[in-house]
């Protein structure tokens, strides 16, 4: 699968190696953006880091959608996990201590679900009666 399709397409299925390769590329891009923003100084650094993090939602959602489909889940399962993890991670800075702790725990649980379900468990085997297209997606019925 081409790199652009891997990181931007929501169609098809990918296995664990492709999922982890794509995840590593996105994480590396975020680390490089963080290093670059630190070199620019305090004036624009936080904005660059925030923009890079927001931009990374799209490729991570695309990877999670394809991997979720490979696990036998609906296409929206993976992106919903990614969005819920990010939204629950944004809240603690704006809430009182007890609510922030609860939201942090919820975010950790979502990360564990995503890690185990999308990252560690093997993909589901497609039924033999269902043909797949070149991209690996099931044809529309």
Image (cartoon, rainbow, N blue to C red):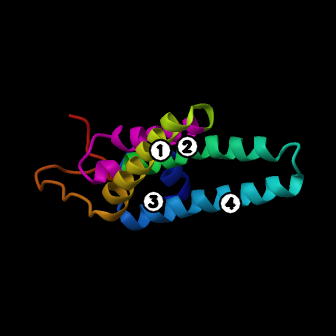
Q: Which residue is mark 4?
A: 31
Which label lies toward us, 3 or 2? 2
Q: Residues within 10 Å of mark 1 (few under 14, many from 20)?
A: many
Q: Is residue 89 left or right of residue 131?
A: right
Q: Residues within 10 Å of mark 3 (few under 14, many from 20)?
A: few
Determine the secondary structure under disc 2: helix
Which label lies toward us, 3 or 1? 1
Where 81 sits versus 41, above or below? above
Residue 11 percent coordinates (x, y) = 39, 44
Q: Which residue is mark 3?
A: 1
Which stretch did the figure color magenta? Answer: 67-92
Which label lies toward us, 3 or 4? 4
Q: Is residue 129 left or right of residue 68?
A: left
Identify the main secondary structure in magenta: helix
Q: Disc 3 to disc 2, how far (Cα)? A: 20 Å
Determine the secondary structure under disc 3: loop
Which label lies toward us, 1 or 4? 4
Counting residues from the start of the chain, the first of labels 2 and 4 encountered is: 4
Q: Do callouts 3 and 2 mark residues in contact (Cβ within 8 Å)?
A: no
Q: Do callouts 1 and 2 mark residues in contact (Cβ within 8 Å)?
A: yes
Q: Residue at x 19, y 59 (%)?
A: 125
Q: Residue at x 32, y 53 (%)?
A: 136
Examine the rendering and report whether any part of residue 13 can be seen: no
Q: Which residue is mark 2?
A: 57
Where 35 sits versus 58, above or below? below
Q: Which residue is mark 1?
A: 61
Residue 21 percent coordinates (x, y) = 49, 65
Counting residues from the start of the chain, the first of labels 3 and 1 encountered is: 3
Spot the residue most to the left. 129
Q: Residues within 10 Å of mark 4 (few under 14, many from 20)?
A: some
Q: Disc 2 to disc 4, how far (Cα)? A: 15 Å
């Amino acid at each position: 699968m081409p790199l652009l399709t891997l990181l931007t397409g929501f169609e098809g299925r990918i296995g664990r190696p492709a999922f982890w390769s794509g995840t590593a590329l996105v994480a590396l891009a975020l680390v490089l953006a963080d290093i670059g923003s630190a070199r620019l100084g305090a004036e624009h650094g936080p904005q660059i880091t925030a923009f890079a993090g927001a931009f990374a939602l799209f490729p991570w959602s695309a990877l999670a959608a394809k991997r979720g489909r490979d696990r036998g889940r609906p296409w929206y399962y993976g992106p919903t996990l990614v969005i819920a993890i990010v939204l629950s991670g944004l809240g603690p800075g704006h809430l009182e201590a007890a609510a922030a702790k609860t939201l942090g725990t919820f975010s950790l649980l979502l990360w564990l679900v995503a890690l185990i379900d999308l990252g560690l468990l093997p993909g589901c085997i497609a039924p033999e009666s269902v043909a797949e297209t070149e991209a690996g997606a099931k044809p529309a019925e």
